[in-house]
Amino acid sequence: MAKRQERHQRKKENKEKVSRVKTPRGKLAKSTKISLSILAAILLLVIAGSIFFFQKYGKEVTAAIDAGEEHAAKIQESDFKQYHPTTILDKNGQVIKELKTQERDYLTYDKMDPLVSQALTSIEDKRFYEHHGVDTQGLLTVALNAATGRGVRGASTITQQLVKNIYLTPEVSISRKIEEMVMAQSLEKKFTKHQILEYYLNNVYFGHGAYGINAAAKVYFGKSINDTSLLEKATLVGITNNPGIFDPTTNKKNALKRAKLILKEMNAQGYITKEQYDKAVKDDFNAEVHSNALNNQLDNNEVALAVDSTTKILMGQQDFRFQYQFDTKEEEDRYNEEYTTAYNKVYQRILSGGYQISTNIDPGLHDQLQGILSNVMNSWQDRGGENNFYTKQAALTVIDNQTGDVVASVGGRGEEGNHYNRAFLSYRQPGSAIKPLVSYAPAYERGLLESSAVSDDRPNNTYPNNVYNGSKGNLTLRNALAISSNVVAYKLASENRDELKEPIYQPLAQMQFTGLDVADDNPIIAVGGMTYGATTQEMASGIATLVNQGNYRTPLNIQTIKRKDNGQEIFTQNDLAQQKVYSDDAAYLTIDTMKAVHQNADGTAAGLSLAHNQYWAVKTGTTDEAKDLWTVGATPYYTVAVWAGDDTPQPQDNASVGQATKEIFKQTMDLLNNGKEDVDFQMPSSVQKAGGQLVTRSSQTKQVLATRKNALQTATASIDTLAKQKANELTAAKLNTPMVEEASTFSNQLISERIDTLSQFELIVTDTQDNWQTFDQYAQQVFALVQQVEPSGGTLSDQYTNVYRNKEAEYAHEKAARDSAINTVKDQIDDTKNQSKDLDKRINDLKKQLEEKD
């Protein structure tokens, strides 16, 4: 350190000497002129570039500066010193988990070996002691990278990195870079250089759950940072650049190479002697993860969800832009990388301490639901894999429909050591369980009703196929969902996209389904053919959205989040806003349609009943080869989603495993709804009963529009017919003009004009009018004239023949169109009669049932 300070002093003295040298007056040297010219050119370029930059990014820059100053005003020392472990409280305020995931052993600057901070500054920020938070020389790197299309990268000082680690998400943009720079300069005004180094080295992430360099030394080398060798110190500092690439346990070669680069810089900058350098580069290390140094195992499903939810909440507070649908695969991949980086950073900070997370977790209820799932799945005892866990697994999510809270998150069968929460982490193909969300609710948005009929005939010879391998003809939407027609769901999804002019997965994106892919804008997802799939939590929140009149609420088990250092409440559940995904009537109609799945004799959940509810909705789901089995549904009080299958998808016995999901669903609902009043789902004012069926505002609007459209078409057709009639009157007047009896008095030109006039005749073919015979009479008159002039045929005969044949073809086409329209109307009348008979039958059956009850 002394050598470096001496070198800085010599540089300063040399500058002073140079400034005292007097330049001779008179003409400037040629080299000086050239230098000044170049400087002038550069200055002009800089000015021009600045003008362009501020024209393009001026507003963005101003907003970023304001945001940076706003965040900077809130910076406090306790942000970097979180001595208190994060605690998770249950619904009664009792501590159910205290996260002691790292032995922080916070080291102040004066107690840390100076070689550690020297290693850091030598490789990460050579001008650390010279700048004020932002390296103005390094900004040229940022400009060059931006100009060459390599993004806004480079020139991050240690102070800026600290700001980014603690306060900002890793978004790469001009506004974020400026915000970071403003905050860094503010940080340098509040704290000394030594404090900043102290904060950085105690907060940066080193991988394997280690936050801070002292924790990292214990994780990788089993000792304190001050007890490590010079090579080990350089190795640990090297990790901060990229914990994955420079992990000394999995990528020793990379870690060693970077460590030696750091040592070389330390020697070159005078921090270590040549002897120290030579000794260190010849040294070696043995790194391994010491699991006893950290305890970051979240072995409670509910706690794991709470930490995940908290992570996403804090990411949002750091202005991370969540995204659920993408235009290109490249955009999707880029987002996933940014998301993972931001998530891991915030997640590790939560584990490292400083927060009190109050939840609605009910440990007793969780144990009861875990018991239901484990007992039902107890029939399958096969185990496998490295950890010898059960091969066949299941997951369960329960949502309170009144609040939107996740009441329970059961992520597996609960065997010892298996802590993976499949309920919110495992993406599985949802099969037919997704149909209400992507096919039926949007169809009801378009104005269709439960009684609307759709053909069950396959649209092509490839897909989709029904599980019953055939077609059941025209099906009402209610019947189609009850028997789970894949064909109808596929057709509805396709029509929804065409008519609503939005991607098929649009409602899923609005409900924050995180496994969506650009390829999922395909009607095949209506039968569960998604690229990645969905979780039980996402499926439950989707159905809960239907119960909540189409309003989506983010599924959380978090009530409040507080900072422990100052008691500040940084989140409350009231902060969350609902998002309208479906109209009230579309949501209600979908829920009502789902009742048919268990009410209809041929429904896929026929025979399933709940002990305390008669008003409930359900949908089953089965994927190809029954690799994933689902039962999702709701009462007015709770929504439950159940999945079962193998962690590595394998064909299942649908009869047994599918029945298991229904049994878990039933027992869960019976437990949750016991003691609650048996009430129906709330019907919105936009839905009414008329003519024995539910009619919605959407359907009435569509009917009005259809009536207006038909009236307009009828009026247009009438006007068109009148115009044709007027045109024909003029044509007839020409054709009926007196003729000289002798054909010889007619010139070919006059007859040709008669043929042209004939071609102008307008054919009228409707269900009430047909003027072909009138046309034919005129045609015979003209033909007689042609025969007199050209008895053996000729030019006029050919001209006449072409006109007549064209009119003949036009008439045939118009007649076929009319007949087709008439047949369609007849079919609609027949369908209506059949539906009416079916409705009468159901009314009679209902009357009989009521009479039997009486």
Image (spheres, rainbow, N blue to C red):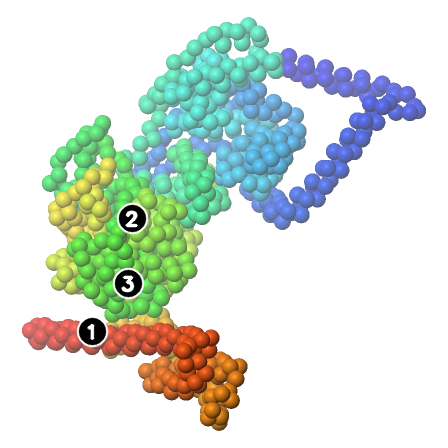
Q: CA distance from mark 2 to mark 1?
A: 32 Å
Against 834, residue 555 (above or below) is above
**Residue count near mark 2 (Cα–Cα under 10 Å), binned few <14, some 14–19, many ≥20:** some
Q: Residue at x 23, y 61 (%)?
A: 457
Q: Is residue 45 visible?
A: yes
Q: Residue at x 72, y 41 (%)?
A: 48
Against 689, residue 73 (above or below) is above
Q: Is residue 544 visible?
A: no
Q: Nearer the viewer, residue 805 or 27?
A: 805
Q: Amino acid at mark 1?
A: Gln
Q: Earlier in the sequence, mark 2 or mark 1?
A: 2
Name the residue carrying label 1.
835
User: Residue 626 placed where, x, y %?
Assistant: 19, 46
Q: Earlier in the sequence, mark 3 or mark 2?
A: 2
State the SS at label 1.
helix
Q: Amino acid at mark 3?
A: Thr
User: Residue 209 placed where, x, y %?
Assistant: 38, 29
Could you tell whether 501 is left or right of 491 in the image?
right
User: Which residue lies most toward the left here?
Assistant: 852
Q: Nearer the viewer, residue 785 or 360?
A: 785
Could you tell whether 389 is left or right of 310 in the image?
left
Q: Nearer the viewer, residue 658 or 166?
A: 658
Name the residue carrying label 2.
529
Q: Amino acid at mark 2?
A: Gly
State the SS at label 3.
helix
